Amino acid sequence: MTSAIKIIEMLKVIDNRAKFIGIKLNMMKNLLEKYKDDKELLKEVLKLTEGTRLHELILEAYPPLEKLKEELKKEEIIPIVDIEEKKPEEFCHFDGHISIIAYIREYMKKYYFGSTVKKIFYEIGKDYAIKMGIDNYDKMINIMKEEFGETYIEKSEPITFIVKNSKEAMNCRALEPVCYLTAGFIAGCLENITEKKYIIEVIEKKCMALGDPYCQFIVKRYIKL
Protein backbone atom coordinates (compact mmCIF):
# COMPACT_ATOMS: atom_id res chain seq x y z
CA MET A 1 0.00 0.00 0.00
CA THR A 2 1.38 3.41 -1.01
CA SER A 3 2.03 5.83 1.86
CA ALA A 4 2.01 9.62 1.83
CA ILE A 5 5.77 9.63 2.44
CA LYS A 6 6.34 7.43 -0.60
CA ILE A 7 4.25 9.75 -2.78
CA ILE A 8 6.22 12.75 -1.50
CA GLU A 9 9.48 10.98 -2.31
CA MET A 10 8.26 10.40 -5.88
CA LEU A 11 7.19 14.05 -6.15
CA LYS A 12 10.64 15.14 -5.00
CA VAL A 13 12.26 12.99 -7.67
CA ILE A 14 10.07 14.65 -10.32
CA ASP A 15 10.92 18.11 -8.94
CA ASN A 16 14.67 17.37 -9.01
CA ARG A 17 14.83 15.70 -12.42
CA ALA A 18 12.28 17.52 -14.59
CA LYS A 19 14.02 20.62 -15.95
CA PHE A 20 11.03 22.37 -17.51
CA ILE A 21 8.19 23.59 -15.29
CA GLY A 22 5.46 22.49 -17.72
CA ILE A 23 6.75 18.92 -17.86
CA LYS A 24 7.29 18.94 -14.08
CA LEU A 25 3.72 20.03 -13.33
CA ASN A 26 2.25 17.55 -15.81
CA MET A 27 4.19 14.64 -14.31
CA MET A 28 3.09 15.66 -10.80
CA LYS A 29 -0.52 15.91 -11.95
CA ASN A 30 -0.40 12.42 -13.47
CA LEU A 31 1.04 10.98 -10.27
CA LEU A 32 -1.46 12.66 -7.93
CA GLU A 33 -4.40 11.76 -10.18
CA LYS A 34 -3.70 8.08 -9.54
CA TYR A 35 -4.76 8.59 -5.93
CA LYS A 36 -7.74 10.92 -6.52
CA ASP A 37 -10.13 8.45 -4.88
CA ASP A 38 -8.08 8.29 -1.68
CA LYS A 39 -8.77 11.71 -0.14
CA GLU A 40 -7.23 10.85 3.22
CA LEU A 41 -3.95 9.89 1.56
CA LEU A 42 -3.84 13.14 -0.42
CA LYS A 43 -4.69 15.12 2.71
CA GLU A 44 -1.72 13.50 4.43
CA VAL A 45 0.50 14.55 1.51
CA LEU A 46 -0.73 18.13 1.93
CA LYS A 47 -0.13 18.07 5.68
CA LEU A 48 3.40 16.68 5.41
CA THR A 49 4.47 19.20 2.75
CA GLU A 50 2.81 22.25 4.37
CA GLY A 51 5.04 25.32 4.22
CA THR A 52 7.39 23.92 1.55
CA ARG A 53 8.02 24.77 -2.10
CA LEU A 54 6.85 21.28 -3.02
CA HIS A 55 3.46 22.05 -1.42
CA GLU A 56 2.95 25.03 -3.72
CA LEU A 57 4.03 23.05 -6.76
CA ILE A 58 1.57 20.21 -6.20
CA LEU A 59 -1.29 22.66 -5.66
CA GLU A 60 -0.43 24.29 -8.98
CA ALA A 61 -0.07 20.91 -10.68
CA TYR A 62 -3.32 19.45 -9.38
CA PRO A 63 -5.97 22.13 -8.56
CA PRO A 64 -8.46 19.66 -6.94
CA LEU A 65 -6.08 19.62 -3.97
CA GLU A 66 -7.20 23.19 -3.15
CA LYS A 67 -10.59 21.80 -2.12
CA LEU A 68 -8.93 19.21 0.10
CA LYS A 69 -6.81 21.95 1.64
CA GLU A 70 -9.97 23.85 2.56
CA GLU A 71 -11.37 20.69 4.15
CA LEU A 72 -8.18 20.35 6.18
CA LYS A 73 -8.54 23.90 7.50
CA LYS A 74 -12.06 23.11 8.70
CA GLU A 75 -10.87 19.91 10.36
CA GLU A 76 -8.20 21.87 12.24
CA ILE A 77 -10.87 23.91 14.06
CA ILE A 78 -10.98 21.97 17.34
CA PRO A 79 -12.39 22.80 20.78
CA ILE A 80 -10.11 24.92 22.96
CA VAL A 81 -10.16 22.24 25.64
CA ASP A 82 -8.26 19.90 23.31
CA ILE A 83 -5.42 22.33 22.50
CA GLU A 84 -3.46 21.76 25.70
CA GLU A 85 -3.71 18.00 25.32
CA LYS A 86 -2.38 17.97 21.75
CA LYS A 87 1.19 16.66 21.57
CA PRO A 88 3.83 18.49 19.51
CA GLU A 89 4.17 17.19 15.97
CA GLU A 90 6.92 14.64 15.46
CA PHE A 91 9.36 15.51 12.70
CA CYS A 92 10.98 12.08 12.58
CA HIS A 93 9.04 8.89 13.24
CA PHE A 94 10.76 6.17 15.26
CA ASP A 95 10.36 2.48 14.58
CA GLY A 96 12.19 0.38 17.17
CA HIS A 97 15.36 1.10 19.15
CA ILE A 98 17.05 4.43 18.41
CA SER A 99 20.26 6.01 19.66
CA ILE A 100 20.31 8.72 22.31
CA ILE A 101 21.78 11.04 19.64
CA ALA A 102 18.69 10.65 17.43
CA TYR A 103 16.31 11.13 20.38
CA ILE A 104 18.05 14.30 21.61
CA ARG A 105 18.05 15.72 18.06
CA GLU A 106 14.31 15.21 17.60
CA TYR A 107 13.51 16.42 21.13
CA MET A 108 15.44 19.65 20.55
CA LYS A 109 13.81 20.05 17.14
CA LYS A 110 10.26 19.61 18.45
CA TYR A 111 10.43 21.63 21.65
CA TYR A 112 13.14 24.25 21.17
CA PHE A 113 14.84 24.94 17.85
CA GLY A 114 12.67 23.64 14.98
CA SER A 115 14.55 23.44 11.68
CA THR A 116 17.46 25.43 13.21
CA VAL A 117 18.54 22.21 14.90
CA LYS A 118 20.11 21.14 11.58
CA LYS A 119 22.66 23.96 11.76
CA ILE A 120 23.19 23.50 15.51
CA PHE A 121 23.97 19.78 15.29
CA TYR A 122 26.14 20.30 12.19
CA GLU A 123 28.24 22.87 14.06
CA ILE A 124 28.43 20.64 17.17
CA GLY A 125 29.77 17.77 15.06
CA LYS A 126 32.24 20.07 13.33
CA ASP A 127 33.48 21.62 16.55
CA TYR A 128 33.85 18.17 18.16
CA ALA A 129 36.08 16.98 15.30
CA ILE A 130 38.22 20.12 15.39
CA LYS A 131 38.66 20.01 19.19
CA MET A 132 39.75 16.35 18.97
CA GLY A 133 42.48 17.38 16.54
CA ILE A 134 41.88 14.57 14.05
CA ASP A 135 44.61 15.02 11.43
CA ASN A 136 44.49 11.91 9.22
CA TYR A 137 41.93 9.69 7.51
CA ASP A 138 42.71 6.57 9.55
CA LYS A 139 41.89 8.31 12.84
CA MET A 140 38.80 9.84 11.29
CA ILE A 141 37.42 6.53 9.99
CA ASN A 142 38.15 4.70 13.25
CA ILE A 143 36.36 7.29 15.38
CA MET A 144 33.43 7.44 12.97
CA LYS A 145 33.04 3.66 13.15
CA GLU A 146 32.90 3.92 16.92
CA GLU A 147 30.69 7.01 17.24
CA PHE A 148 28.50 7.11 14.12
CA GLY A 149 28.45 3.78 12.27
CA GLU A 150 30.47 1.61 9.89
CA THR A 151 32.28 4.10 7.66
CA TYR A 152 34.34 3.98 4.48
CA ILE A 153 35.32 6.29 1.62
CA GLU A 154 33.35 5.43 -1.53
CA LYS A 155 35.32 7.63 -3.93
CA SER A 156 37.84 10.46 -3.85
CA GLU A 157 36.44 12.97 -6.37
CA PRO A 158 34.31 14.37 -5.05
CA ILE A 159 35.20 12.85 -1.69
CA THR A 160 32.24 10.66 -0.78
CA PHE A 161 31.70 8.88 2.53
CA ILE A 162 29.34 5.98 3.19
CA VAL A 163 28.03 5.30 6.70
CA LYS A 164 26.17 2.04 7.27
CA ASN A 165 23.91 1.48 10.29
CA SER A 166 24.08 5.18 11.13
CA LYS A 167 23.32 5.85 14.79
CA GLU A 168 21.61 9.10 13.79
CA ALA A 169 19.30 7.52 11.22
CA MET A 170 18.74 3.92 12.34
CA ASN A 171 15.03 3.15 12.86
CA CYS A 172 14.06 6.75 12.01
CA ARG A 173 11.68 7.71 9.20
CA ALA A 174 11.78 11.25 7.84
CA LEU A 175 11.17 13.33 4.71
CA GLU A 176 14.76 14.56 4.50
CA PRO A 177 18.25 13.43 5.60
CA VAL A 178 18.76 13.64 9.38
CA CYS A 179 22.47 12.96 10.02
CA TYR A 180 23.44 16.56 10.78
CA LEU A 181 25.98 15.64 13.48
CA THR A 182 27.77 13.16 11.21
CA ALA A 183 27.95 15.67 8.34
CA GLY A 184 29.42 18.31 10.65
CA PHE A 185 31.93 15.86 12.07
CA ILE A 186 33.16 14.98 8.56
CA ALA A 187 33.54 18.69 7.76
CA GLY A 188 35.53 19.34 10.95
CA CYS A 189 37.83 16.38 10.33
CA LEU A 190 38.59 17.46 6.77
CA GLU A 191 39.31 21.03 7.83
CA ASN A 192 41.89 19.64 10.25
CA ILE A 193 43.32 17.19 7.72
CA THR A 194 43.73 19.93 5.08
CA GLU A 195 45.13 22.33 7.71
CA LYS A 196 42.17 24.67 7.13
CA LYS A 197 43.29 25.47 3.57
CA TYR A 198 39.74 24.88 2.37
CA ILE A 199 36.22 25.80 3.38
CA ILE A 200 34.50 22.43 3.70
CA GLU A 201 30.80 21.80 3.11
CA VAL A 202 29.32 18.32 3.63
CA ILE A 203 25.93 17.40 2.19
CA GLU A 204 24.05 14.20 2.97
CA LYS A 205 22.65 12.87 -0.33
CA LYS A 206 21.28 9.52 0.87
CA CYS A 207 19.96 8.65 4.29
CA MET A 208 18.58 5.54 5.99
CA ALA A 209 15.79 7.75 7.37
CA LEU A 210 14.59 8.14 3.77
CA GLY A 211 14.62 4.40 3.22
CA ASP A 212 18.08 4.30 1.60
CA PRO A 213 20.28 1.29 2.47
CA TYR A 214 23.02 3.56 3.87
CA CYS A 215 23.87 7.22 4.43
CA GLN A 216 26.00 8.97 1.82
CA PHE A 217 27.90 12.23 2.35
CA ILE A 218 29.33 14.35 -0.47
CA VAL A 219 32.18 16.75 0.33
CA LYS A 220 32.52 20.13 -1.36
CA ARG A 221 35.78 22.05 -0.99
CA TYR A 222 36.29 25.76 -1.60
CA ILE A 223 39.73 27.39 -1.57
CA LYS A 224 39.98 30.18 1.00
CA LEU A 225 40.71 33.54 -0.58
Image (cartoon, grey):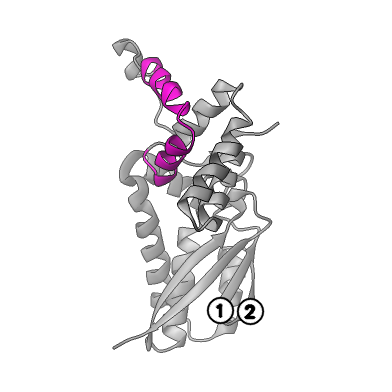
Instruction: Kindly identify which numbered label has been placed on residue 155.
Output: 2
Left or right of 130 in this view: 205: right
On screen, residue 216 above or below 169: below
Instruction: Kindly identify which numbered label has been placed on residue 110.
Output: none
Q: Position of residue 71 (x, y in %)?
A: 42, 18
Report helix, strand or loop for mark 2: strand
| Residue 63 located within the stretch drawn in magenta | yes
| Dominant SS type (magenta) | helix
Type of amino acid under label 1: Ile
Labelled pair 2, 1 in contact (Cβ < 8 Å): yes
Report helix, strand or loop for mark 1: strand
The residue nearer to you, when weighing 196 against 97, is 196
Toward the front, the furthest residue is 22
Q: Position of residue 59 (x, y in %)?
A: 43, 35
Left or right of 67 in this view: 213: right
Magenta residues, start to end: 51-75
Q: Judge whether residue 170 can be spotted in this image.
A: yes
Q: Position of residue 78 (x, y in %)?
A: 35, 13
* Residue holding disc 1: 159
On screen, residue 168 above or below 109: below
Residue at x 59%, y 49% (from the top left corner): 210
Type of amino acid under label 2: Lys
